[in-house]
Each structure stands twice: as C-alpha cells, then as structure tokens.
Amino acid sequence: MVSAVDVAPAAGEARSPVDDRLAAAVEQAIRDVPDPEIPVLTLDDLGIVREVRVDADSGTVDVTLTPTYSGCPATEVIAGDVARAITRHGLRPRVVTRLAPPWTTDWMSERGRIRLREFGIAPPAPGVATRGSRVQGLSLSVRQVACPRCGSESTEQIARFGSTPCKALRRCLDCREPFDEFKPL
Ligand SMILES: [Zn+2]
C-alpha cells in the first residue's frame, strides 16, 4: 500500500536552483517535524524518515516514511506536516509511505528514548523488538518495563492499549502511578 501526498508550491513562487544549503535545510526541517501524538519527539527521534532525496533540477523533494505501525492514524497527519515543511522552502513535496521493512522500535534514537521517558512514557528498550533478531529466551511476558517516574521495575500491564494503539497502559507497583509504555515492535 502506497499513499502519496502531492502539494503544489504556492502560485507565483519562484523556483530557484536548489543549492546544498537549501537541500540541507529542507532535510533538517523534515527530520524536525514533531510527532503529532508525542510532540516531544521529532520524526528523526522516531526513526520513521527512511529517505530524503532532493532533486536540484526539478525542485522536487522525495520523502519516504515508514509509519510506526501500519494502521497508525497519525501517518496522514505526519505526511501532511512533512509536505508543508517542504513547500515552506519553496520546493515541491512527494511523500510516500513504505510499510516494508516494517518500522521497529530499534530505529528510535537514543535522544528519542530519553525524551520519551522525560515525557512520562516508558521507552522501548533497544534490542527487544519482537521482529527480527531477538535475544534467546527473552519473551515479552517476562520483559521488564521500568516506571518512567520512579524507575522501579515492578510494573504490570493493565491494558493492552494506552492513550493510542501504539502504547500499552501499565501501572507501577511501587509508586502506584499508571503510565503509557511505547510498545516494542
Ligand atoms: Zn513508579
């Protein structure tokens, strides 16, 4: 399944030749787009920007996004935000969504994990993704999820889905606070 967002630049906008500085600036603007559900995270933190290609002659910017999971309702919003970041630079966006290979929480940046914890959401531990390589003998049922508030590892899942389908709702057995966990994928 491929969906494309194609927004033409504003009428009358001069299409100047794309130099390296403009290409770098537009790529940074794309990577800095905030996640609509967790605004402390950028698309770069999430690791969902798979490719940015700037065509200097046509002024077209091709962006490939892999959503955090295939049914994520935020994907359309993100594609629109990316397209606007490109048109703001006077360039023409072509945003496509690629589902394979599927996004994994292993693609999240270290900075993204730190920001997620500061935001009160337990980040997925690197390397525990259920797809791809998996530590032998480690199963999700015994996976330890630390409380983002007090750091205790005595936590239990109380609902498979938290505030969004990408998250599970857990509770800390020490400080008693419920919290969202970004589910490893
Ligand atoms: Zn706690």
Image (spheres, grey):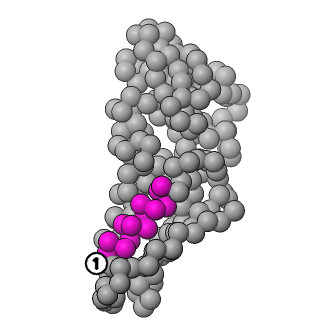
Q: Which residue is mark 1?
A: 21
Residue 35 in view: yes
Residue 41 locus on image (x, y percent): 39, 46
Q: Residue 132, relative to residue 170: is it above or below? A: below
Residue 40, above or below 25? above
> Which one is nearer the viewer's eye here, 96 or 46?
96
**Image location of residue 113, percent across then percent down:** 42, 39
Q: Of helix, strand and loop, which one carries label 1?
A: helix
Name which residue lies at 39% across and 67% down: 84
**Is the shortest distance between ligand 1 and the CB of mark 1 under 8 Å?**
no
Residue 112 among those drawn in magenta: no
Q: Residue at the location (31% across, 85% down)?
A: 13
Residue 36 versus residue 116 in the image, above or below:
below
Could you say which quadrant of the image residue 28 lies in?
bottom left
* Quarter containing the C terminus: top right
Q: Which residue appears at 51% of the width and 13% of the height?
A: 154
Q: Position of residue 55 (x, y in %)?
A: 45, 84
Q: Which residues are magenta?
A: 77-89
Residue shown at the point (35%, 43%) measured from the top left: 40
Q: Is residue 159 left or right of residue 36?
A: right
- Number of numbered labels in the structure image: 1
Residue 111 picture quarter: top left
* Predominant SS along the magenta part: helix
Kind of residue sitting beneath label 1: Arg
Residue with the most extreme front position: 11
Of 53 and 139, the residue lying toward us? 53
Where in the figure is residue 11, as x and y percent of width and height?
A: 35, 84
The quarter of the image holding the N terminus is: bottom right
Residue 152 appears in the figure: no
Q: Residue 87: say if magenta.
A: yes
